[in-house]
Amino acid sequence: AGCAGAPIDGSDGGGGCGGNDTTTTVPPDGTTTTDSQDRPDDSDSLSGLEVGYETLAGGFTSPVDVAIPEAFDGTKRFVVDQPGRIWLHDESGLRSNPYLDITDRVVDVGGYDERGLLGLAFHPEFRDNGRLYLRYSAPSRSGTPSNYSHTFVLSELTVDPEATTVSADSERTLLEVPEPQSNHNAGAIVF
């Protein structure tokens, strides 16, 4: 063990170990770990804290993401539902029609499936350019090996930023990747 700020060879550098709030251990493989010896007890600061939840919307099949574009200062929330729909929740509540429906472009998902519409991101300048991005699992494309599961798609749409429903007619595919397996299909998109 050494002192905080001491050389990692374990010596104290000749200056002693006054204070010693942190110890550094160097195992034979050369990696280091740091452990605090004087951790504050946070339990007192949590006394009286109450935690709860309020359901804002329901009725989704399998919600996998919520996107809150900065362009709308938190007033619009978009819920990504795995089968291929995005729902808008705003000051009026959950809209009765999907904001976007691409179920015709997404593989059929059932029961326990890791494919589907998995990611949504809004361009940082969405209010000016109307660009949003999708990540989804599409049926296998022509030329994909027959034993492959699906095609990974990353695409861009340009839509009216103020609309409460949009179409995928403007979709521009940015990337397609044949996927051999139906599982391990993470889909988060971020800027």
Image (cartoon, grey):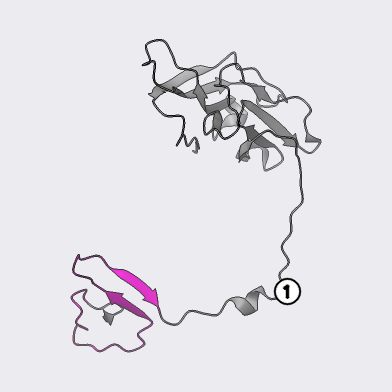
Position of 121 relative to 104 (above/below): below
Residue visible at 52% across and 34% down?
A: 114
Residue 84 on image: x %, y %? 61, 25
Horizontal side of 6 relative to 20 (left or right) equals left
Residue 164 on image: x %, y %? 73, 26
Residue 170 on image: x %, y %? 57, 15
Horizontal side of 119 relative to 148 (left or right) equals right
Secondary structure found at label 1: loop
Looking at this view, name the residue that lies furthest to the right.
92
Using the image as rendered, state which of residue 51 and residue 157 is in the foreground.
Answer: 51
Image-quadrant location for residue 66: top right
Position of 152 relative to 51 (above/below): above
Residue visible at 67% across and 42% down?
A: 73
Q: Residues within 10 Å of mark 1 (few under 14, many from 20)?
A: few
Using the image as rendered, state which of residue 68 and residue 119 is in the foreground.
Answer: 119
- Magenta highlight range: 7-36
Residue 9 among magenta residues: yes
Horizontal side of 188 relative to 167 (left or right) equals left
Position of 105 relative to 57 (above/below): above
Residue 149 among magenta residues: no
Looking at this view, name the residue that lies furthest to the top.
142
Is residue 101 visible in this depiction of the protein?
yes
Q: Main secondary structure of the magenta part?
A: loop
Image-quadrant location for residue 159: top right
Is residue 122 visible in this depiction of the protein?
no
Residue 30 on image: x %, y %? 20, 66
Residue topped by disc 1: 48
In the rendered view of the protein, which quadrant contains the N terminus?
bottom left
Residue visible at 19% across and 83% down?
A: 13
